[in-house]
Amino acid sequence: MTPTALEIADRVGAGELTAEAAVGESLRRFVRLDGDLNAFTHVFADRALIEARAIDSALAAGAPPGPLCGVPFAVKNLYDIAGEATLVGSVVRADAAPATSDAPLVARLKAAGAILIGALNMDEFAYGFVTENAHYGPTRNPHDLDRIVGGSSGGSAAAVAAGIVPLTLGSDTNGSIRVPAALCGIFGLKPTFGRLDRTGVFPFVDSLDHAGPFAATLTDLAAVYDVLAAGEGVPPIGRGLAAAAARPLRVGVLGDHFTEGAFPEVLVSLQRAGEALGATFGVSLPGARAARSAAFCLTSYEGGRLHREEVRTRADLYDPAVRDRLRAGLLLPDEVAAAAQAVRRLFREEARRLFLDYDVLLAPTTPCPAPKIGQATMLLNGEEVSVRRNLGAYTQPISFIGLPVVNVPVFNAGALPLGVQIIAPAWREDLAFAAAARLVAAGVAVAHPPPI
C-alpha cells in the first residue's frame, strides 16, 4: 500500500527513510503509471531529487524536520512554479515568461519540507468538469481507464488516487476540487472563499476561485490544510481530529435541488453518510437552482472578460469548447453580472438562516459516477443532458457563496467511487472536518483503492 504523507514525514523525520528515497519511489510510480493516466504535464525529477538530498543533508546536520518533511507533492498547472511558465492547460500561454517565484501556497508546502515533483493536467483555463484537454489529452480515471476523472483539477485527483503522490493542490470555481475528488474516490477540501492565498494561482473567475488540497486520507488532508492555512493565522485542525470524531453535531441532509436527478447509488451513499451522522433528511435550501443559474452567468461573464484580448487575437489556439463559452460570456451585458450578484446575496442569507439550525449540511458531490471519456450526454430524470454542464449541479450553488466543503469518498465495494459534500458555515472548516472524522471513524468515508 502506498504510504500516506504523514507516514512518509514521520519516517523521514525519524531517519528511517530518506527524502531522496521517498521522491525516488514517487518518480518510479510516475514512470509506471502515468503513461496510462496522463495526470502530469511536467515532471521536475532532477530538481526534486536535488531538493530531497538537501533535506537529507539538513536533517543529518541536526535541523528539525518540517511537518511534511520529504513528502512528494504536485500542483495543478495553474500554480506559479519558479522558473516555469504557468500554462494553465493551454497553448495560448506557451510563450509566457517563466514565473519568478513559487505561488505562496507552493512555497508554504516546501517550507514544511514537502518536495514538488510536477505539474498536473487540467481543463484548459479551468473551464470544465472533465479534464479532457484538447492539447494535452484526457486524464484517465485510475478506477477505470475508459472513464473521466472530473475536472477541472482532474490531474490533481488522479495523481493522488493512483498513489503517485500523497498530496496535490487544485482549484475550485464551481466544483473543480470536489467533483474530481468524488469521481476518483479521495478526500478534497474547498475552503472558505478567501481563506487561502490565491497569489500566483492563475485566475478563472476572480469572485469564485478557491485554492485547496487533495489527499487519500482525512488526516493527510488536515495536515496539508494546516500548513497552508498557518500563513493565514488559522488554528491547526489535524491534531484535534480524533477528538472531533466524538463531537456532537447537528447535521442536515439537503434535498430538493441537491438530490434531483441523482443516480440511485448516489442516493444510497448519501443515505449511509446521513445515517452515520444521525442527520435530519430532506432539508431544504431555498434558491439553490437560481444560485446555480447565477453562478453560470457570473462564470461566463468574468471568464469572458479575463480572456477578451486573447480570444479576439488568438482564438485559433483555444480549445473550441472553451473558446465558444468565453465568446458567449463576452456577449453578456453588465446587468447580468449585477443580477447574479443580487441572487448571490439572497442565497447567502438563506444559507446563513439554515445554519442557525444545523452545524453542517450534507449533499451528493456529483449526480452520477464517472462517465466515459468522450461521453457528451447522460440521462438525469429521464432527460438527456450535457455531461459537462451537469457534473457540477450540486457543487455550483455552494461555491457561489464561498462556503467550506470537505468531499469524503463513500466506499462501496465493487462500485465506482462516489462522494458526499460536507458543507459548513463560512470560516468553519473545523466543523466540516469534525463531521468527516466521524464518517471515517464509522468506516463510511474511506478512499477507494483503484485497481491500477
Image (cartoon, rainbow, N blue to C red):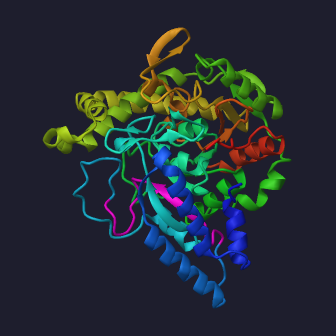
Q: Is 315 situated left or right of 181 in this image?
A: left
Residue 81 belongs to magenta span? yes
On the image, the x and y values in percent for residue 46 come to 44, 72
Please report the bounds of the magenta region as a residue range. Answer: 67-85
Magenta: main secondary structure = loop
Q: Position of residue 49 (x, y in %)?
A: 50, 74
Asked if residue 181 shows in the view, the reply is yes
Query: Residue extending furthest front?
Result: 32
Q: Residue furthest left?
A: 313
Q: Is residue 15 left or right of residue 322?
A: right
- Quarter of the rendering containing residue 414: top right
Q: Is residue 61 above or below residue 236?
A: below
Where 379 sits versus 1, above or below? Answer: above
Q: Does residue 210 appear anywhere in the picture?
A: no
The vertical placement of 343 against 208, above or below, is above
Q: Residue at 39% x, 41% y: name it.
A: 123
Compare residues 383 and 356 and report the one nearer the observer. Answer: 383
Residue 134 falls inside the magenta stretch: no
Q: Residue at x 71, y 48 (%)?
A: 433
